[in-house]
Image (tube, rainbow, N blue to C red):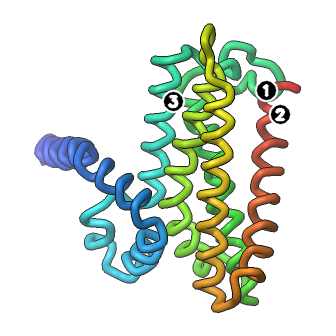
Amino acid sequence: MDFLKLIQSLDELLYEVMSWLIFYPVTLWRALAQPLKMMDYSEAELGDPADRQYTDTLSPPLFLLLTLVLCHAIELSVVGQNAVILRRTGLGGLVNDDSTYILLRVAFFSLFPLIMAARLVRARNVKLDRVPLKAPFYSQCYVTAPFALMVSTSGILMQLTPGGSPLWGLALLLAALLWFGSLQILWFAQHLRIGRLRAALHASRAMVEALIAFVAISLIFVGI
């Protein structure tokens, strides 16, 4: 019986993994084409039974994880191994292979949905705990994944040598920040039912907090 259960588990795992080939591009397209609708969709799906959630897309955290795995694979094929793994200075010594580096990138980029979600909960004057934080965190993962893809691509462009494209990389980074920041203003305005000016203040505060945390932890891990 245990062997049969193992076979059934493998069947389910294989189907789940192969289904990503269909639902990842679907989710990416929808997140790029209709980001705010995807954020609303994410919160609505959390109200469904667990076995009926995200049946036509990837779940937000999984989508973010797979995007960062894809980013790392592209980086390996284009520019080679990342300097954090090669240098092993500072806390970067703990990052000694691709798996730990991917987990590190997941933790870094997860700062954005976490801090944005926390800012929304605090702005609502709701007690900050796991329950009210989950829905906005999940919805933020849907837009953080394309943002991470754009930021990672900009980093790759800036590393290309000879004939690198630092200006293209900087342009893409700026476009990513503008795209992500604009979405945050609209998202805060919608969920807090406030004007866009006040929403921009909430979004800017959260964005600055996330960027400071991202840069500070990055510098610690690269040993600067």
Q: Is residue 94 above or below residue 115?
A: above
In front: 166, or 100? Answer: 166
| Residue 35 locus on image (x, y percent) | 46, 65
* Residue pointed to by mark 1: 222
122 vs 19, left or right, is right
Which residue is found at the position 65% from the left and 87% from the top?
192
Which residue is found at the position 59% from the left and 57% from the top?
179
Which residue is found at the position 62% from the left and 61% from the top?
113
Separation of disc 2 and disc 3 at Cα?
19 Å
Callout 3: SS: helix
Q: Which labelled disc corresponds to residue 57?
A: none
In front: 150, or 40? Answer: 150
Around disc 3, counting alpha carbons within 10 Å, would you say few (fewer than 14), some (14 to 19), or many (20 or more)?
many
Callout 1: SS: helix
- Is any part of residue 219 visible from this angle? yes
199 vs 224, left or right, is left
Amino acid type at mark 1: Val
Which residue of the protein is positioned furthest toward the right in this rendering? 224
186 vs 12, left or right, is right
Contact flag, marks 1 and 2 (Cβ < 8 Å): yes
* Residue pointed to by mark 3: 72
Q: Is residue 128 above or below residue 3?
A: below
Separation of disc 1 and disc 2 at Cα?
5 Å
Separation of disc 3 and disc 1 at Cα?
17 Å
In front: 40, or 8? Answer: 40
Around disc 2, counting alpha carbons within 10 Å, would you say few (fewer than 14), some (14 to 19), or many (20 or more)?
some
The image quarter containing residue 122 is bottom right
Q: Which labelled disc corresponds to residue 219?
A: 2
| Residue 223 locus on image (x, y percent) | 84, 25
Amino acid type at mark 2: Leu
